[in-house]
Structure formats: C-alpha cells, structure tokens
Amino acid sequence: MVDPVKTLPSYVLMLFLWAALPPSLFGHRLDEYLQATLVTIEPGKIRLQINLTPGVAVADAVLPFVDRNRDGIISTNEAAAYCELLKRDLVLVLDQHKLNLNITASNFPAPADLRTGWAIIQVEFSATLDPLTAGTHKLVIQNRHLPKVSVYLCNAAQPKSKAVQITQQKRNDNQSECEMGFTVEPGKDNAQN
C-alpha cells in the first residue's frame, strides 16, 4: 500500500503544514496597538527605534492622535506633534539620571494603510551621553504611551562597539518597562584582536 504523505512533494507538505498553523503566528493581534522598541547602546549615544502598529480594531482609536484634523493625510506638523506626544510618554534613565530624548527620524504611512493593521509608524529617538565610565551601568526605559490599547515589546540590539556589552535584560509583565544592564570598557574598540 502506498503512503500518500510520502508521495507528496515536500513543498506541498510544507504548504499544508503552513496552512494548518494558527493565524496568530503571522501577525500581531487585531485589537491592540503593538509598540516594539529596539534599544541600541553605544559609548556616546542611546537610540530607541520604535515600531508602532495599530491593529484593525484599535486603529480608529489611535488615529485621532496622529491625524489630528482627520483629513486622511498625516501632515509634517501632525507627524511632529505625534512624535512629541510619544516622547512625553517615554522615560529613559541611565544610572538614576533621566536622559533627554531627541527625535531623529520618523516615517508615517497614510491613515488608510494604518487601518489595515499592517502598516507601521516608525519613530527613532536618541540621547547623547557624556563619556561613560568603565564598569557596569543600568538603563531603564518606560513606555507609558496609550496603555489602554497597547502591548509592548522591548529588546536590546547587539552594540556595534566592542566597548559595550549587554549583560542583562529584565522586563515587567507587559514589557512597558525594561531594565538593561551593560558594561563599558573604554578603548576596547581600539584594541587589536
């Protein structure tokens, strides 16, 4: 007797398995505002790259904060105002000292695209640092932006500088607060390997 699974080409079997997976594995939840933050720590700067994806069911609750005049177009002034609103809801503390964030980049899809649940608002902030002393440091990031409709993710990126090493990441239950421990070894970038 012929086993029908063994006679199927492997790509057909993979397609069948892919179709059997739950849809939740392929995207974010429809009823939440996903705020994913990637944190880059370098000797003289900290960057926060935040991707904001409104789910279909919450897009109409989020869009009035972005498209303030509700004309279906996100103007430069509206984008800047939303970035400022987001910045006010972020707290960045290094070794118990609050850091000032600067908006360094942003990208806003059209409101119609944001209503699909697939479009992503991208905002980047940076904080310039005084030279970090050698040893251990602690960075705390708090995101308080639209908590009633939001879910959060927060992760450290691999530093480009060999002088910085991430040693620890702790998050609260919903990842709206993240603590990162790291060490600094000044001059390590210049050392020969």
Image (tube, rainbow, N blue to C red):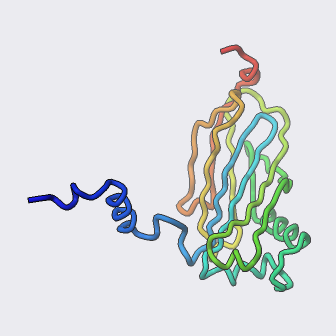
Q: Position of residue 106 (x, y in %)?
A: 81, 60
Give the residue furthest to the right: 77
Determine the residue positioned at 58% across, 59% down: 175
Towards the viewer: 17 or 4: 4
Q: In which quarter of the image is the N terminus?
A: bottom left
Q: Quadrant of the C terminus?
A: top right
Q: Report the number of numbered marks.
A: 0
Give the residue furthest to the left: 1
Determine the residue positioned at 72% across, 16% down: 191
Q: Position of residue 24 (x, y in %)?
A: 46, 69
Determine the residue positioned at 55% across, 68% down: 28
Towards the viewer: 172 or 105: 105
Image side of residue 81 versus residue 147, left or right: right
Q: Position of residue 80 (x, y in %)?
A: 87, 67
Q: Is residue 121 above or below residue 41?
A: below
Towards the viewer: 63 or 7: 7
Image side of residue 31 versus residue 129, left or right: left
Q: Position of residue 180 (x, y in %)?
A: 63, 44
Towards the viewer: 96 or 24: 24
Q: Is residue 124 above or below residue 42?
A: below
